[in-house]
Amino acid sequence: MLDIIFNKAIYFISTLILARLLGPSEFGILGMITIFFTIGTTLVDSGLSISIVRTLSPNKIEYSTIFYLNIVFSTGAYFLMFFIAPYVADFYKQEILTNLIRIYCIGFLINALKMVPQSILIKEMDFKKIAIFNIPGNIIGLVIGVLMALNDYKVWSIVGLFLSSQLISSLVYIFFSKWKPSFYFSIKYVKRHLSFGYKLMLSAQLNTIFENIYNVLIGKYFTIQVLGYYDRAYTLNNYPTSILSLIVSKVSLPLFSNIQEDSLKFKQIYRKIQLFSFFLAAPVMLGALVLAKPLILVLMGNGWIEIVPFFQILCLAYVLFPIHTLNINILNAFGKSNTFLKIEIFKKIITVLFIIIGLQFGIMGLVWSNVFGSIFSLIINTHFCGSLISYKSKNQIFDLIPTLGIAIIMAVTVHLASLYLIKFSSLTQLVSLTILGVTSFIGLSYFTKNESLFTFLDFIKSN
């Protein structure tokens, strides 16, 4: 938790500083290529890191085979993006995108070097080393990105931040990890891991396309500034939920994999993690929704005030994301990559319908389609994953309702209080209303004897 919060905080603060130094247009340009970089990243990994983590006793031949396979895939992904870059630039009518994609996607080659060492540490649940290894890259990336922005490098400042942080991070993993690649390569292990991983890769590609389709559509049919607003709203919203989702993902996958034979214990642990995750996600996202205006003004300044409605709508979508992550890890732990792929295809078909309907209502309709897609995904994920552990979808949702109800009451309380503080500074509003929100949420949870609160307190005491 400390690793993800601290290291993501550094990167998040870096982008906030750059947002103040740059503007919506620069982030709009970057938003146009996000989909291509993410597609390439999933091609490089191809589900192999998850396959390694869930394998009970991998050997040094397997590790080396996956390492070299990542290198091959990263090289292929880079050259693919290198050649399609001019066509992307022509699609958006932005000439700068050709060089931007070709430079930004060097990150494929860099990231491939650390995938196996990082996966080994995750498998061993050695999160202390992961935390330490991630710090240098984020700090150096922050310094380089800000210096480039101050020297008027504009959108290249964001590229510099990303590539420098990834390069330093990969070098740290290479030099300080106990594992080192050896000259082993086995076709047998290629087949074994790809037979599991390629389905996850296809599922990841579907997710990538549909998570970034909004950027593509906004970049094509709306202004570059609107894309910049949406991209920052998405990133700002994604920060707290991605922290929690990463914690849930990194811890639950190796944990679930180790207890997959004990169905009763599996269900008990899954339920506890679910209650814990939603107890954190619900108040944070609904609180952010009602505090959106002072939050944006404090973090990003007056020039970004137009992202407030985007941000508020996305809060409703992202409140469920940690639960999505948890359900997905059930499928991964049981090796159900085939089921995973089928579920993702079905969900994406419905997502297309939501997007088509949303587009009829303009940019806000498009943003609202995120919310409906998230709710639909919750129903589908809990149904199929719950059947594996005898924890029905309706039971999962009913277990979340008490926390959701308390979070809604908290949000309404904070909103009403904000009406009396409107004359105060944004910082004063943000601090005082946050304190009110935290105390009212915890107080109501204690008064109503919400099980999620006591699950959370048990976690704190035990750690």
Image (cartoon, rainbow, N blue to C red):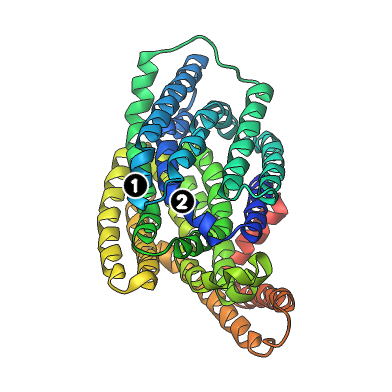
Q: Quadrant of residue 351?
A: bottom left
Kindly identify which residue carries mark 2. Answer: 325
The answer to whether any part of residue 330 appears in the image is yes
The answer to whether any part of residue 1 appears in the image is no
Residue at the spot 40% in from the left edge and 67% down from the top edge: 367
Asked if residue 213 lies left or right of residue 410, the reply is left
Q: Real-space Cα distance between discs 2 and 1? A: 36 Å
Asked if residue 15 lies left or right of residue 81, the reply is right
Q: Mark 1 is on which residue type?
A: Asp
Q: Mark 2 is on which residue type?
A: Thr
Asked if residue 296 lies left or right of residue 260, the reply is right
Residue 279 vs residue 156, the one in the foreground: 156
Query: Percent from the top left, x then y, of residue 348?
Result: 29, 54
Query: Percent from the top left, x then y, of residue 136?
Result: 71, 37
Residue 6 vs residue 80, the one in the foreground: 80
Tell me which label, 2 or 1, sits earlier in the chain: 1
Q: Quadrant of residue 412?
A: bottom right
Kindly identify which residue carries mark 1. Answer: 90
Asked if residue 72 lies left or right of residue 361, the reply is right
Residue 146 vs residue 252, the one in the foreground: 146
Residue at the spot 47% in from the left edge and 23% down from the top edge: 71
Residue at the spot 59% in from the left edge and 47% down from the top edge: 158
Residue at the spot 53% in from the left edge and 52% down from the top edge: 245
Judge the density around disc 2: few (<14), some (14-19), many (≥20) Cα neighbours within 10 Å: many
